[in-house]
Amino acid sequence: MSPAGVVDLLVDGPWSHSLVAANGARFHVAECGAADDPLVLFLHGFPEFWWAWRHQLPVVAEAGYRAVAMDLRGYGASDKTPRGYDPYTAAADVSGVIRSLGATDAVVIGHGWGGFIAWSAAVLAPRQVRGLAAVSAPHPLLLARSGLTKALTRTAWFQLPILPERRLLAQDGIHIEGLLRAWSAPGGTFPDAEASRRYRAALQVWPAPHCALEYHRWFARSRLRPDGRKYSARMRTPIDVPVLQLHGAQDSAVSPTATTPPRLVTASLRHELLATAGHFPHEETPYLFNSMLVNWLASLE
């Protein structure tokens, strides 16, 4: 497998590709649906890129929405800046992309670290978020609780210099495939050969491995720093838009028992558990996931 160029990440399908400028960087987006339909913005997690939402984009567009999946800063075909991998910058990225797409607000749907960013945007950029769906992503205040996730141990290892990046690059990214399999439900079909190939290739585009790990590094390093304490204080602000939490019951990366306390969401809060899915329910069980998501979106109108 040879390292993918950025053009190889612009996978063909029933969507269009474009670059939008926001918050001092350029972001790649893939979109389906009419430009004047209500905007639904999808944020991928680690170790993926926009293509993680390939099963959702056409379905959500068919339901009457403008469905857009962006590559986060540092991933895919978006700019890979030397800094900007903290939740304040990421929330401003999301807010800026929404405005650059010509919308005033959006329902923001995030998986994993994309969910962490979606939660953050709902508090830090509330005018641009009219609804929030967090997939395999507990509220950030819950993530910090010891023993909640295996992700915290992984995040600690990611603090080492150079070695984590080398591991992600080694043997054409075979470690990426290992993570995808380990975090999925046992006995499932995800990742198939195409998913494994695409996700491995996407993190061969330097400096994507380094950028991807910087999100993890901020989370670990900030806990004892003023910026981390300030962030935690801000995230105690109740969210006053509808929230959907979707989680795979067999998620071995993030505990599916991490339900959000009602005090943190003053609007409607729905929690759905997908019995046969692991950490990637939108890819492991897309039909069931899409049904739950579209039904929830319809309830917002």
Image (cartoon, rainbow, N blue to C red):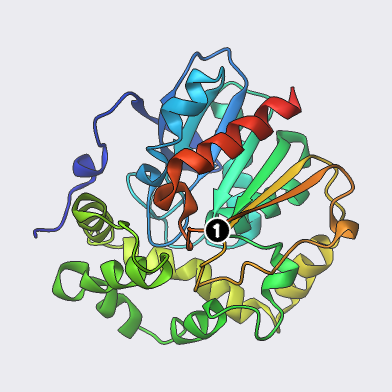
Per the image, label 1 sits on a secondary structure element best described as loop
| Along the line of sight, the residue nearer the viewer: 8 or 283 | 283
Drawn side of residue 93 relative to residue 72, left or right: right
Residue that appears at 49% across and 22% down: 61
User: What number of labels is visible?
Assistant: 1
Residue 110 located left or right of residue 174: right
Residue 285 coordinates in the image, percent (x, y): 44, 48
Where residue 86 appears, as percent x and y from the top left, is 59, 63
Quarter occupied by the C terminus: top right
Residue 224 in view of the camera? yes
Q: Residue at x 33, y 60 (%)?
A: 208
Residue toward you, 245 or 197: 245
Q: Residue at x 39, y 44 (%)?
A: 50
Question: For this view, does 95 lie left or right of residue 12?
Answer: right
- Residue hosting label 1: 275
Which image quarter holds the N terminus?
bottom left
In the rendered image, the vertical position of residue 191 relative to residue 239, given as above or below? below
Is the residue marked by circle 1 packed among few (<14), some (14-19), or many (20+) residues within 10 Å? Answer: some
Q: Please, is residue 164 above or below residue 121 in the view?
A: below
**Amino acid type shown at disc 1:** Ala
x and y percentages locating residue 65 in the rendered image: 56, 21
Q: Is residue 162 visible?
A: no
Q: Quadrant of residue 274?
A: bottom right
Give the answer, above or below, for where 224 lies relative to 35.
below
Q: Is residue 58 left or right of residue 178?
A: right
Q: Residue furthest left?
A: 1
The location of residue 206, given as percent across then percent down, is: 26, 62
Q: Residue at x 29, y 72 (%)?
A: 178
